[in-house]
């Protein structure tokens, strides 16, 4: 299939020679901004409590498998958008009343989608300035507040981070909420970081979150993620914290053993002291060895951490390789501002389908911090097979003078190419459609892909915590199904894996309980559903549109 799209992409400002550097050797995706044309006119606004947050959730809320959007509004109301995009065509969204009370739609910082109650319908956990919410998904993209029904005390904190995981033996997920400054404490905001919250479900037939416990000390969390850092089968809770307000704080890793009280990893365990303006976490297996690497956004340079494999397997000792791999993203690559950059949402994803993970970072000044760049475009770091990254934001067309916060990377129009939504502070959200590999004045098809949907019966139907291992040729590409990370943003649905020029792939699943599936052999450029215990993967075909059919004939 050949696709040529004649288009003109106008950068908001030119690339600076100090930041842009050499063009990547790999394909650069051509990203076309079309938020207003697609029907999305939404901004994240408000005073200093909304300097942080500004997230979005992508989920299928009406059963058509297209990712719909729930976007935070800060002081203004959050908005649900239903995806009406044609397969392979321009992006189209319609605002919809989700049945949520007006007071609950305001003061929203972000949201994460997943199936809390195991009924097969995606729910939303909404993080707020004030009471956090569990919203049960219902028919045709409607939601119902379940705080009282689930004995969930959403508290009144300033929550900016969230993560969830199914602990061994539990029917329902464990929920972790990361809180920022305790605004009611004397001397606030300096040195008054709030404790974080952990909710473990009781052994009941319905979700019961009366078992709340604090995670103390808290150091002003802005992102958190349950992660199986040493592939032991027991995820730990990683938290990145904002040093701007804490005193004596650092990055944190909590050991969360089923049936035991959580405890922090310490120097005695090998955990190293690190203080950054931590704002976002991204996990990705860059080496294809099953062990995750982490990108941590901050003010100034991004950290890229690799586990010290020569250390004891119980010791979380990490080396920062961001400089060696070209991933510091420490100052703007366009616009001419030479002051340090400010990073927020981070996400590893394969934008050009070559098999190597790329790294997206949302950028934007906190508000008017004079020591940091005021014009700070988002980064698109293209990964290479040498393990290094090359900036391509200016070439891809995402170098806009916006104040990015949260983001969603997913395939909105089911054409096998990853698109991008960025939530901006005090400016309209940006929505980029991936047109393919940039070529001359247009675009062509880049690499091949497989998109994978998992299902298992009973608890945790979407297999949160599963490892998806895709082998194509001599390379292995790993993805973990997770809820959390980024910056106040998450997505649920198909897991996208680029496979380069390969036409076939072999998929194996390590289910959350540690059992491995048999290998499933699939053809590339397909969406597949893998049900636990099945002998074969099932193909799912998006509805054909005129645009899709025309592209397929060329």
Image: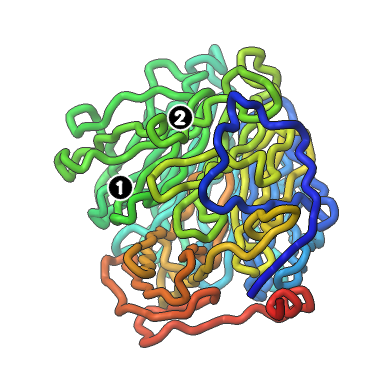
> What residue is rendered at 56% in x and 53% in y?
27
Under tag 1, what secondary structure?
Answer: loop
> What residue is rendered at 51% in x and 47% in y?
25
Query: Which residue, as the protein is rendered here, is positioned at the far bottom?
Result: 535
For label 2, the residue is: 241
Is 340 or 145 nearer to us in this picture?
340
Q: Is residue 188 above or below residue 395?
A: above
Under tag 2, what secondary structure?
Answer: strand
* Pointer 1 local density, CA inside 10 Å: few below 14, some 14–19, many at least 20: many
- Asked if residue 5 can be seen in this view, the reply is yes
For label 1, the residue is: 229
Residue 501 on image: x %, y %: 48, 68
Residue 122 on image: x %, y %: 58, 66
Q: Is residue 246 above or below residue 13?
A: above
Residue 171 figure quarter: bottom left
> What residue is rendered at 50% in x and 75% in y?
524
Mark linked to residue 411 = none
Which quadrant is the C terminus positioned in?
bottom right
- Asked if residue 61 can be seen in this view, the reply is no
> What residue is rendered at 44% in x and 34% in y?
240
Which quadrant is the N terminus positioned in?
bottom right
For the residues carrying marks 1 and 2, which lies nearer the camera in this image? 1
Residue 73 on image: x %, y %: 73, 42
Mark with earlier residue (1, 2): 1
Its colouring scheme is: rainbow
Residue 148 on image: x %, y %: 57, 55
* Pointer 2 local density, CA inside 10 Å: few below 14, some 14–19, many at least 20: many
Residue 261 figure quarter: top left
From the viewer's perspective, tell me whether residue 222 is left or right of residue 315. right
């Amino acid at each position: 299939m050949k696709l040529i799209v004649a288009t003109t992409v106008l950068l908001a400002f030119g690339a600076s020679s100090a930041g842009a550097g050499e063009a990547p050797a790999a394909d650069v995706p051509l990203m076309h901004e079309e938020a207003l044309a697609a029907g999305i006119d939404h901004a994240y606004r408000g005073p200093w409590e909304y300097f942080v947050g500004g997230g979005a959730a992508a989920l299928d809320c009406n059963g058509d498998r297209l990712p719909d959007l729930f976007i935070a509004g800060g002081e203004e109301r959050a908005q649900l958008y239903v995806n009406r995009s044609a397969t392979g065509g321009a992006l189209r969204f319609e605002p919809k009343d989700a049945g949520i009370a007006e007071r609950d739609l305001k003061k929203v910082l972000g949201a994460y989608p997943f199936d809390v109650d195991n009924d097969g319908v995606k729910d939303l956990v909404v993080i707020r300035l004030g009471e956090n919410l569990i919203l049960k998904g219902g028919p045709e993209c409607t939601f119902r507040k379940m705080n009282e029904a689930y004995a969930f005390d959403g508290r009144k904190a300033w929550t900016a981070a969230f993560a969830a995981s199914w602990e061994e033996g539990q029917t329902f997920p464990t929920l972790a909420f990361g809180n920022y400054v305790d605004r009611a404490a004397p001397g606030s905001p300096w040195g008054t970081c709030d404790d974080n919250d952990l909710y473990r479900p009781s052994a009941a037939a319905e979700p019961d979150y009366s078992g709340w416990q604090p995670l103390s000390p808290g150091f002003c969390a802005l992102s958190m993620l349950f992660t199986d850092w040493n592939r032991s089968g027991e995820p730990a809770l990683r938290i990145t914290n904002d040093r701007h307000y804490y005193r004596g704080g650092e990055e944190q890793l909590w050991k969360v053993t089923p049936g035991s009280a959580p405890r922090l990893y310490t120097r005695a365990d090998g955990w190293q002291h690190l203080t950054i303006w931590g704002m976002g976490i991204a996990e990705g297996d860059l080496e294809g060895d099953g062990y995750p690497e982490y990108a941590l956004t901050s003010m100034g340079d991004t950290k890229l951490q690799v586990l010290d494999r020569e250390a004891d397997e119980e010791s979380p000792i990490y080396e920062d390789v961001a400089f060696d791999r070209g991933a510091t993203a420490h100052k703007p690559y366009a616009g001419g501002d030479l002051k340090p950059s400010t990073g927020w949402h981070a996400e590893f994803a394969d934008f050009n389908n070559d098999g190597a993970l790329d790294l997206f970072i949302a950028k934007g000044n906190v508000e008017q911090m004079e020591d940091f760049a005021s014009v700070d475009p988002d980064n698109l770091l293209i990964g290479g097979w040498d393990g290094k990254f090359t900036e391509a934001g200016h070439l891809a067309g995402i170098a806009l003078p916006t104040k990015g916060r949260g983001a969603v990377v997913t395939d909105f129009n089911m054409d096998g190419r990853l698109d991008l939504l960025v939530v901006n502070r005090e400016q309209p959200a940006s929505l980029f459609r991936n047109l393919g590999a940039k070529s001359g004045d247009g675009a062509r098809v880049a690499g091949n892909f497989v998109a994978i949907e998992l299902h298992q019966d009973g608890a945790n139907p979407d297999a949160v915590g599963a490892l998806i291992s895709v082998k194509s040729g001599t390379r292995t590409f790993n993805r973990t199904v997770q809820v959390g990370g980024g910056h106040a943003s998450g997505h649920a649905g198909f897991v996208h894996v680029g496979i380069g020029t390969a036409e076939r792939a072999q998929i194996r699943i390590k289910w959350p309980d540690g059992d491995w599936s048999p290998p499933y052999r699939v053809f590339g450029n397909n969406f597949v559903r893998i049900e636990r215990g099945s002998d074969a993967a099932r193909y799912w075909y998006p509805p054909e549109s005129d645009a899709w059919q025309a592209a397929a004939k060329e």
